Amino acid sequence: MDEPPVSFDVSAPSLHSQLFTIRVWQEDVGEGHSEWRGQVRHVMSGETCYFRDWQLLIAFIVKMTTTTKT
C-alpha cells in the first residue's frame, strides 16, 4: 500500500525551530598542511561565530538554542 507523500509547510516558521547557516572550508597553514575553518551564523539574530574545531560550533549552536526565544 502506497503512503501519501509527507508535506511540510516551510513558509510557516515553527515556534521551536532555529535557522543557522554554516560555511566550512580548508585553509592552507603552510608546509603542505591545511586546517578546516568555519563560520556559523544564527539567521534570526545575525550573531556569528568563527571556529576551527567542531566543539566550538556545537557550543555556539547550544548557546543560541538555549538562550534565544522565538
Image (cartoon, rainbow, N blue to C red):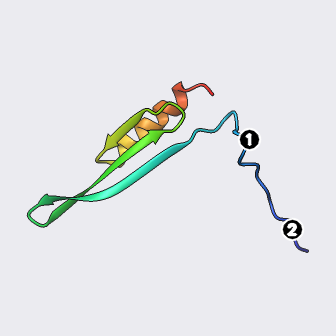
Q: Residue at x 48, y 47 (%)?
A: 21
Q: Position of residue 29 (x, y in %)?
A: 15, 57
| Number of residue marks | 2
Q: Amino acid at mark 2?
A: Glu
The residue that mark 2 highlights is: 3
33, above or below 45, in the image? below
Q: Label 2, label 1: how many angstroms apart (C-alpha)?
A: 24 Å
Q: Which picture quadrant has residue 65?
A: top right
User: Which amino acid lies under the numbered mark 1 shown in the image of this protein?
Assistant: Ala
The secondary element bearing badge 2 is classed as loop
Instruction: Name the mark nearer the viewer: 2 or 1.
Output: 1
Q: Closer to the N terminus: mark 2 or mark 1?
A: 2
The disc at residue 12 is 1
User: In the image, residue 51 lies at what x, y percent?
Assistant: 31, 44
Q: Is residue 14 left or right of residue 39?
A: right
Name the residue at 20% across, 61% down: 34
Q: Quadrant of the C terminus?
A: top right
Residue 49 position (above or below residue 54): above
Q: Is residue 61 left or right of residue 18?
A: left
Residue 68 position by quadrant: top right
Q: Residue furthest bottom?
A: 1
